[in-house]
Image: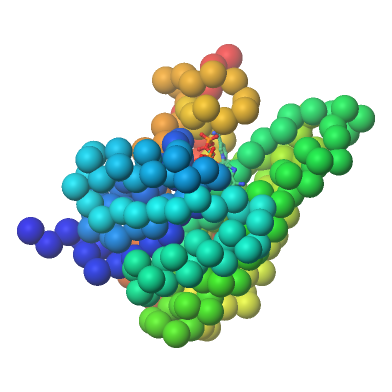
Amino acid sequence: MIKPFEGKTAMVTGATRGIGRAIAKMLAANGVRVAICGRTQSGTQTAVKELVDETGGWITGIECDVTKPEAIRKFFAFTDDHLTSLDILVNNAGIGVFRSVAEMTGEEWQATIDTNLTGVFHCCHLAIERFKRGRGGLIVNIASLAGKNAFAGGAAYNASKFGLIGFSEALMLDHRHDNVRVTTILPGSVSTEFGRGPRADWKIQSEDIAEVVRMAVAMPERTMVSSIEMRPSRPAK
Ligand SMILES: NC(=O)c1ccc[n+]([C@@H]2O[C@H](COP(=O)([O-])OP(=O)(O)OC[C@H]3O[C@@H](n4cnc5c(N)ncnc54)[C@H](OP(=O)(O)O)[C@@H]3O)[C@@H](O)[C@H]2O)c1
């Protein structure tokens, strides 16, 4: 049976667990050939194997720390070799360091900005080169409601996600006439291992974010799902 997205290819950053993994799983289950990354080769290969077992889909991967431009270039070269073309880039890799400005170190600040913002720039830059050689493409940026609402202890994370939302909008305006669609997703609390609080049933589940990505991919090319906010229906009081 032909799957809905058969023939498409995708890269997903930070897909060893959490939201990125759920997105990679959804894409592979729908027939997309997917390349994923995480910071270590062992973690990435374990995720690849598990995702192949879970979906029966076509998934590969390589270590890539998105704070390192050279590692990003290698991830794209690896993808060129294994996927040959690129239709979808999901910028999901992200970290959160939650401390007041006085308590935060320069290294923590830099790591947050490099992962959540500068890494996205480098990935988009290389993806657009490939989109222009092909039929265009879709970029999905996983931002956050923390990119609209600041909170105490969030200085670095807020700055990175406010920046990512501005970057995503400008990216869309720069390249919409090159057949590049940009979807920015702004989730509230998602039940993952991410920094703020334990997993919980009342939170958004990673699969719910993947469902929005599925909708963005499925949308007719004339229409772009440009920005989506998601939040728990009934947050803990
Ligand atoms: N959870 C939430 O409540 C929430 C809400 C809004 C937005 N978000 C955003 O959603 C995204 C995913 O979050 P999550 O909750 O799924 O977090 P998570 O469970 O901690 O997963 C983060 C993923 O990113 C990878 N990663 C981290 N730093 C990386 C780097 N420098 N290079 C490559 N990969 C890296 C990790 O892989 P390795 O450890 O194997 O490297 C892991 O696969 C982030 O951008 C986050 O800001 C999360």
- Residue in front for this viewpoint, 237 or 165: 165
Query: Which residue lies at the image location 19% right of the left edge and 47% below the top edge?
Result: 56
Is residue 176 in view?
A: no
- Residue in front for this viewpoint, 154 or 50: 50
Q: Where in the figure is residue 220, as x and y percent of width and height?
A: 33, 70
Is residue 126 in view?
A: yes
Q: Quadrant of the C terminus?
A: top right
The answer to whether 228 appears left or right of 60 in the picture is right
Q: Which residue lies furthest to the top in this view?
A: 237
Q: In which quarter of the image is residue 106?
A: top right
In the displayed structure, 23 sits above or below 86; it is above
In the displayed structure, 57 sits above or below 78; it is above
The answer to whether 166 appears left or right of 189 in the picture is right
In the displayed structure, 82 sits above or below 165; it is below
Q: Where in the figure is residue 20, as x and y percent of width and height?
A: 45, 44
Q: Which residue lies furthest to the front in this view?
A: 42
Query: Which residue lies at the image location 74% right of the left edge and 29% below the top edge?
Result: 98
Query: Which residue lies at the image location 46% right of the left edge and 78% below the top edge?
Result: 131
The answer to whether 165 appears left or right of 84 in the picture is right
- Residue in front for this viewpoint, 219 or 24: 24
Q: In which quarter of the image is the N terminus?
A: bottom left
Q: Quadrant of residue 100?
A: top right
Q: Where in the figure is residue 33, as x and y percent of width and height?
A: 30, 61
Where ligand 1 lies, by quadrant? top right
The answer to whether 93 appears left or right of 50 in the picture is right
Query: Which residue lies at the image location 49% right of the left edge and 67% below the top edge?
Result: 76
